[in-house]
Image (cartoon, helix red, strand yellow):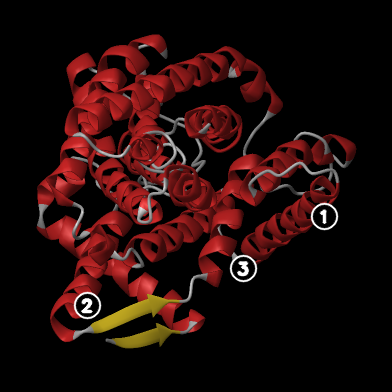
Amino acid sequence: MTTLETPGFLTFTIAIVVFFAGVAINRAIPPLKAWNIPEAVTGGLLMALATFLAYRFLDVEIRFALEARDMLLLYFFTGIGLNAKLDDLITGGRPLLVLLILTVVFLVLQNLIAAGSVAALGLPEGLTVFLGSASLIGGHGTTIAWAPLITERFNIPNAMEVGIATATLGLVVASLVGGPIARHLIARHGLHGPKTGVDVIGLPDKSEHGVRDDVSHVSLLRTVLVLNVAILIGFFVDELLDEVALKLPLFVICLLVAIVMTNTVPRLLPNLVWPTRTRALALVSDFSFNVFLSMSLMSMQLWTLGGLGPALMLVLGLQTLAAVLYIVFIVFPAMGRNYEAAVLSAGFTGISLGATPTAIANMTAVTKTHGAAPRAFIILPLVSAFFIDIVNAAVIGYLAS
């Protein structure tokens, strides 16, 4: 086996090429665009397949350096925070609580499905964690964090491999089903986004006739400067939290710092030009996230899914079916049966089967086609990347005891 290490700058460049490959494929295959499949998902999965074929038939393993990916994620979520006005957060209080409750209920349901499947298929008991919320709601990070304990506690040597395979497949499925779910709900209930409004997350594929584009080198540099200051403060807060043994994902810290900044600095300095809900910030956010998602998906090692047999596929099929039914018949009605609920439904696939970036990608694809839903981009990351991690850790600890 030959291993090819792709350095950071080349990885970054390949990710951009992968994104444009996804754009071309989505244009050539209309159903992909109609079902709101993000371009980065299309191109990223194609590249992941190419690296798999190289591994399988050429004995070549391609490894991508991903340092830039994590920085791009910080830019994106910090941008979301800068767009979060206090009025929206107050209005989003009840939906935030409802979405959290719905997520906790589904977390329990997901683990019950995993436990029942493990018992019915005669699999080792310890795999319940990695066929449930640890891998699907928790993702790769949670899987890697808990794998040593599960391996030791239940004597399962390949526990990490099973968990990583489950998380990877869940990520792929979540990327593919979120858009179609939203499209179904929007069409069935005759929903639509706001007819007018600023771009919050991404710029639309086609600018409206007559809309002045205020993006310039000055507005972009001003936006990047504010983003960098917020991220630097986020790093400082992260170090302070480490000292008191409180660990949060860095992108959540930057999100919260940006929320505080965007609701205080403009009030304290009213003459300061602030980038909240400007096209410049939307452009930086769009760029950061699309490259991030391309890098994440193209770097997936699909060969780690081999050798796990039909049992894993059966359990994942049940989990996917449960997630889709739960989203359509529980999440969408509970969140209000409106356009914002449909956008959150697309994002809930990322919570239930993939990861927060997948959820954001699905929602971004929907809003770029049907209109903005700014509150959804505030409450979902807070639930999926902050509150639910605490609950998930408690549940995993119980199952592992």
- The disc, 2 or 1, on the residue closer to the chain's N-terminal end is 2
- The disc, 3 or 1, on the residue closer to the chain's N-terminal end is 3
Q: Which is nearer the eye, 40 or 388?
A: 388
Residue 63 lies left or right of residue 394; in this view the side is left
Q: Is residue 395 above or below residue 337?
A: below
Q: Which residue is mark 3?
A: 217
Label 2 neighbour load within 10 Å: few <14, some 14-19, many 20+: some
- Cα separation between marks 3 and 2: 43 Å
- The disc, 3 or 2, on the residue closer to the chain's N-terminal end is 2
Q: Amino acid at mark 2?
A: Tyr
Residue at the extreme right of the image, as rendered: 268
Residue at coordinates 53% horizontally, 27% vertically from top-left? 398
Q: Which residue is mark 2?
A: 55
Q: Is residue 214 visible?
A: no
Residue at coordinates 67% horizontally, 65% vertically from top-left? 221
Q: Nearer the viewer, mark 3 or mark 2?
A: 2
**Quadrant occupied by the N terminus:** bottom left
Label 3 neighbour load within 10 Å: few <14, some 14-19, many 20+: few
Q: Which is nearer the eye, 265 or 115?
A: 115
- Cα separation between marks 3 and 1: 29 Å
Residue at coordinates 28% horizontally, 36% vertically from top-left? 178
Q: Secondary structure at mark 1?
A: helix
In the rendering, at what x and y percent does residue 283 appear?
50, 56
Q: Is residue 325 above or below residue 83?
A: above
Q: Which residue is mark 1?
A: 236
Where on the picture, by quarter, is residue 258?
Answer: top right
